[in-house]
Image: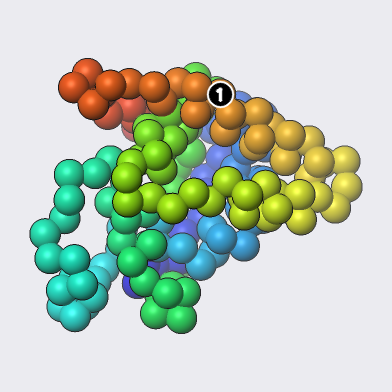
Amino acid sequence: ARPAYRYVTNSSSPIVAAYYRARERMPSTRAALWGAGSYALSEAGHARFGAFPPVTADDLFVDQIFLDAEKCIVSSVPVLVRTPVSTSALLAVLSRQSRGSAEPFAQSTRSNTVRELVGTVRGLRSLFDAVVYAALSILGRRGSGHKSDTAVWERDNSSR
């Protein structure tokens, strides 16, 4: 389970805000365990895998172990997720996320993401947001080519 969350973009650049508007419209962001900054497992859920493997994306790892019907978004006051302020800060986060998505356990979600993203387009603004999302996602993947022995934990320091 994880708490509900809401993106806070009031200090973000227009490009970063567009990225998160597109992301917020995608159904997978409302059902997955990743994204809120925290999640919880029952003892039985944790027993499915034992010790956490040395992965970048532990939330994605856990999310992919469970069926959608086994996941729960707790009805609560949403956790506020402060988004990066600048495009360069967002690209650092996307680079880390892309590296995590490329780890051996991760199942590719690219085709589903493209389908979801196209499905969010309802007009010019949502088309703009989808194009921004796609472009930044591609740029983030290009920046994730670190070798495991030299990888760094890219993070957004702009909103802290």
- Residue name at image x 67 percent, y 47 percent: 114
- Residue 7 seen in render: yes
Residue 103 as seen in the image, left or right of residue 142: left
**Residue farthest to the right, as pictured:** 123
Q: Is residue 144 above or below residue 80?
A: above
Q: Nearer the viewer, residue 70 or 128?
A: 70
The percent coordinates of residue 1 (x first, y second) are 35, 72
The percent coordinates of residue 20 (x first, y second) are 60, 43
The percent coordinates of residue 101 (x first, y second) are 41, 43
Residue 147 as seen in the image, left or right of residue 71: left
> In which image quadrant can residue 79 be found?
bottom left
Q: Nearer the viewer, residue 140 or 85?
A: 140
- Residue type for callout 1: Leu
- Residue name at image x 37 percent, y 62 percent: 63
* Residue wearing tag 1: 139
The percent coordinates of residue 37 (x first, y second) are 34, 52
Q: Quarter holding the C terminus?
A: top left
